[in-house]
Amino acid sequence: AQNEHNVIYFANNSGVLEFDGTHWQLFPLSNRSVVRAVAVDDSGRVYAGGFNDFGFLKTLENGKKVYHSLISKLPEEYRDFGELWKIFVTENGVIFQSFTSVFFYKDGEIKVLAHDKNFHFSFYVGGDLYISERDQGWMKYNGQDFETMTQGEFFAGDRRIWTMMELGADHFLLGTQNDGLFVYRQGTLKVWQNEANRFLKKNQLFSATRISQNYYAFGSIQNGIILTNAKGEILQHINKERGL
């Protein structure tokens, strides 16, 4: 994650790493666990999460920063949530997600949105929180609970969602690791039939991002990165043999 002063923060085995272009600083979590996620809000506050711990970097009166855990604000029965994988900074507050739980932090208080579940990854897209759940598939938080999307059951079991991008209003590109890419539009679900999808089904999708209105990047587990246009035509392929 990067703040407005271009300082970069990395999730690392030893803690949160801060790099200002010249100097490195390390901020271990309270329990010394591996950091799995970092995020920065508009004020520059850096949030981080690891195993059974999440919090933020706090600036002391002397100007030094230290990691400040928020776990003491959680009731005891919710503190065993495992690895914290995702952090989303929203206009309303901060969302923390593990594979069992989802928490919402605002004004110094934590609300438990879900606990003791079988989640995979979550996505904050278009101002809404979506999540992949093993038994119920693709779900959306409705303000009270997580409910399964229309045709969301298609993504139950091992067909879990690894990537999600917004293409328009109620129009998304959903990526699975072994079954490729799907286009969801207003309740209908279709395979994204193109060159990129054939490549990713063969080489296992791992990550994706939208570079601009017309260009996407997809990371694979077995064969590097592809850059595509909006039609899914591969424009560039970068792998180990090509310098990655």
Image (cartoon, rainbow, N blue to C red):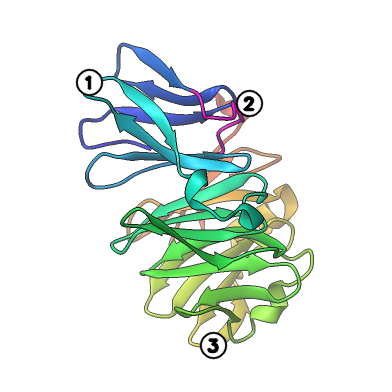
Q: Residue furthest top?
A: 22
- 109 or 12, which is in the foreground? 109
Boundaries of the magenta span:
28-37
Q: Nearer the viewer, mark 2 or mark 1?
A: 1
Report which residue position mark 3 lands on. 187
Instruction: Give the quadrant of the N terminus.
Output: top left
Report which residue position mark 1 lands on. 63
Position of 128 compared to 240: left or right? left
Q: Secondary structure at mark 1?
A: loop
Quarter of the rendering containing residue 60: top left
Position of 41 compared to 109: left or right? left
- x, y (%) of residue 141? 50, 75
Q: Nearer the viewer, mark 3 or mark 1?
A: 1
Disc 3 crowd, CA 10 A, few/some/many (<14, 14-19, 20+)? few
Q: Is residue 59 above or below residue 20?
A: below
Instruction: Give the quadrant of the C terminus.
Output: top right
